[in-house]
Image (cartoon, rainbow, N blue to C red):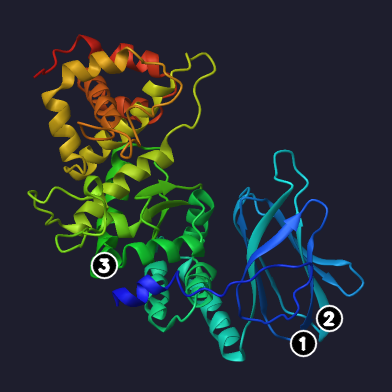
Amino acid sequence: MEKIFAALLLIVPGFSQGQNLPRFDFNQEYLNVKVTKAKEYAQAIELEKGVLYQFYTMQEGMDVVLVLADKNQQNILEKDSPNGKFGPEILEYIPSESKTCWLKIKRLEDEGNPEEGVVSFYVKKFSKTEMLVREQTRQKLQVENKKNFLTADIDHFWEAFDQLKHAKTHYDSLTAFQNLYIDRATAGLIDFIDARNFTAEEYVKIVSKYPRYYHSVRPYTFEVKQAEPLIQEVFDKLKSLYANFKPFKVCFAIGPNRTGGTVSERFVLIGTEMTTTGDHVDFTEFDEASRPDPNKSRKVNIPQRIKSIIAHECIHTQQKNQLDSNAIVCMQLYGSLREGSANFISELVTGTTNYSEVNQYGDAHENEMWNEFKSTLCYPTAEKWMYNGNTVKDRPADLGYYIGYKITQAYYNNSKDKKQAIIDIIEIDDPIEFLQISRYDRVKKNQP
């Protein structure tokens, strides 16, 4: 198994580009295709009536436009995704008649875009069987997307993962993730991809780097299907606490191990591979700083953990997304309050927390942490206190969650009307005013 994964990125057909390829083959990846400001890439391609073709171009530092034109050079389709200089441009086309078309890859005329660069691309010609499967999948997705609790992406990911054992080239690995996972995305995964720019290329790289991790986390990812009744409990409890609560749909997908959860306008989005790591998950491929403490038990009730994560993320779906027009702009405090208040209310809802290590450290160093935090209270970002797992040293990451939690807790405890306090907490739009009313600065704090 490991040798197969290790080979995924190594067995790749090489190619050096001229203006036109001397020979063009479907279902093959072409690398290092040169595109310049003065000269686009163009290739004539013979297409058959009624056949599905997928045109896939990976941008590698240059923003390009992908064009499919007819024999008279009139555009049939054009694609320029809002993903900048990196990531894929993808077109799909079924011709109504057999004909010659032109595939063009053009540099986007935009300030700051390099005048020359390289891309990789392929044109996949789908078989009749593959086209039938895609249509069947489309029909199944219509049913799945009507649900409030989406898990089909988990199954799709592992189907793509299993296909890797048959991969002989990088193209085979790439299309496994593109066609079996990303092309079959639920409405939730589509939002997740838009929010985090997941690509088939990234999945190939990350699964090749951490095969033992993904293999060992697999059985745990299916446990989220047991969490559906618990998620309904979260919605019911939040509705009882906060009358304005609007339930969101929830999507569980598999990511490239860099996002545990986020939200879109329609969904709470969960990176299942990061939120279902049970006691038998293999972290030996990770660097030492990224591995869990071997002395601490990792036995967890995964459905209960999912319940806590959903409660936290659901609070984000209810929060205001901008400050009051009269509020002092104080982004470090505001960011910490958004995360800390989500933790506080999710704890009210579930009775549990997913931040025990952060809380333990915070409780032991609360006074010194607060003095440090308030010395940069209105710093324009919260980067020194949150989302800093790759940079923080000598203490846990994300301690801004703890600070925000403690301020929120003080606000709630000092409020006579607890129902109104919940509304105030969720709808924070003036962080300085909220801090002042909480009187947290006056609370006696622990110190080492």
CB under 8 Å between discs 1 and 3: no
Q: Which amino acid type is marked by label 2?
A: Thr
For residue 155, side relative to residue 444 (left or right): right
| Residue to which mark 1 is pinned | 49
| Residue to which mark 2 is pinned | 100
Residue at point 50% right, 49% down? 195
Q: Which element carries disc 2, helix, strand or loop? A: strand
Q: CA distance from mark 1 to mark 3?
A: 44 Å
Q: Which amino acid type is marked by label 3?
A: Arg
Q: Which element carries disc 1, helix, strand or loop? A: loop
- Circle 2 residues within 10 Å: few <14, some 14–19, many ≥20: some
Disc on res. 109: none
Can you say which quadrant of the picture contains the N terminus?
bottom left
Q: CA distance from mark 2 to mark 1?
A: 11 Å
| Residue to which mark 3 is pinned | 212
Q: Which amino acid type is marked by label 1?
A: Lys
Marks 2, 1: nearer the viewer: 2
In the picture shown, does residue 238 fall above or below 48?
A: above
